[in-house]
Image (tube, rainbow, N blue to C red):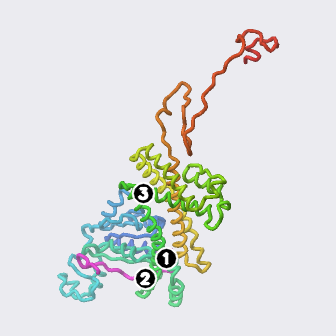
Amino acid sequence: MVMPTNKPVRRVDYSDVIYKTRREKYRAVIREIEEMHAMGRPVLVGTVSVEVSELISRMLPKKIKHYVLNAKRHKEEAEIVANAGQAGAVTIATNMAGRGTDIKLGPGVVKCKEQCCVVCEFECSFCPDSEKRGMKMAECFKKVPCGLHIVGTERHEARRIDRQLRGRSGRQGDPGSSRFFLSLEDDLLRIFGSERISSVMDKLGIQEDEPIEHNLITRAIENAQKKVEGHNFDIRKHLLEYDDVMNKQREVIYEQRSKVLQGGNLKEGIEEIVEEMVDTIVSSYAEEKSHPEDWDITGLKNAVFKQFSFPLQLNAQDLESLTRDSLKEMLLTRAREIYQRKEVEFGEETLRQIEKMVYLQVIDNLWKEHLLGMDHLKEGIGLRGYGQRDPLQEYKKEGYDMFLELVENMKKETVEKLYMVQLAREEMMVPTPAFRPQQFILSRGEEAEPSKPQTVVREGKKVGRNEPCPCGSGKKYKKCCGR
């Protein structure tokens, strides 16, 4: 439903004025400002860009004091806009400048203090002013103009922005007026219908600086704005449909993170993932209908070691009696034993914290990579339309496949990191004169100890540094073999 205004609107919205060129239009804007300024009315000039606002400022005569608001002076703009309703004030502003600030009319600006609704066409039979009694509202307003006057230098693509500019005048029952000045060189008219309007102006013999002002032209411009708005709406709708794909994936990932952050236990989930990984490895390297001798044993060993960090020992005798089910059972039992040892070594509570930390780290890293991949997919997916395929459906399909790959990689990497993690012992950090750690931790497999240093036993008498070298060179030992 449309909410009515607090007080009846007294603003008069005049029809648009159209010129052939921008130069003619800007000259007409200057004339309008000078006329309103001479009448003592405040004027607010709305421009579409900073360049146009500065151009209008340069074209105005120096005797007309004015302010230019183009979002460059943030601190002063609100105060300037608030004072833009004083008598004779001229303010040139872009769309973003001074938004959200009411323009209050100063003394002497409102000449007709009665609450009249100028959009109606009935006569002012009850007006206390005898000179205006019997006039129509529009005629009365033209005779006694007052309030803030809005000058628009160009129509915007969205009618909403034009209404916002008009709406700076006539607030809370105040009088006011607005008028837009256009040219056939404006972007909106150049794209929509400028040729038709130009031909009409030529047929009518319109001279330079002579405008066209008609409600039909105004309606034609509004229709052009509707087309642009519809096009922009389709763009936003299409973009929203693409975003819905990512939103659904984001909900799944964030739900998983929330469960972990809220203290969820991952032990059961890790065990399920281990079973899935075992099934995947066996299915990949041990085909169901093939003989064990034909299995890819090398690939199987490498995959098991990469995923679970333990070496798989299989000899020729084992292969003779081995089946896919027994292989699965053997790998699963071995993987569970290693994880149970970690739980005993780390402690159950510590291992649960490690699981959460590793899982969250894996999710965050892979999710960032996935977002980047989806952005790259979106950039080039529009080319699928040349192949008579719907880009949106292709995006949904490939995005779903990428998401499944993301979930699978999350499982693999989480298990891989958990089986690689080792406990750092305190005795490793005890400082020694030469710091020779007694044991160290490998990234995969069991702990290893370096070989102990051996004592060298000297044979024969020690040779002094200043004694003759035993090699017979005749030099001192320190300058020959003792260097």
Task: Count residues near mark 1 (Cα–Cα under 10 Å), then give few for <14, some for 14-19, many for 20+.
Answer: some
Between discs 1 and 3, the one toward the N terminus: 1
Viewer-proximal residue among 249 and 70 = 249
Identity, as a three-letter code, of the amino acid under mark 3: Glu
Residue 215: quadrant of the picture: bottom left
- The answer to whether residue 368 of the structure is visible from this angle is no
Which contiguous range is marked in magenta?
1-25
Would you name the residue on which mark 3 appears?
Answer: 268
Viewer-proximal residue among 390 and 429 = 429
Label 3 and label 2: CA atoms lie apart by: 63 Å
Between discs 3 and 2, the one toward the N terminus: 2
Could you tell me which residue is drawn at 47 percent across and 82 percent down? 227
Would you name the residue on which mark 1 appears?
Answer: 24
As for residue 15 lying within the magenta part, the answer is: yes
Would you name the residue on which mark 2 appears?
Answer: 222
SS for tag 3?
A: helix
Image coords of residue 256 (percent x, y): 42, 60
SS for tag 1?
A: helix
Q: Residue placed farthest to the right in the image?
A: 473
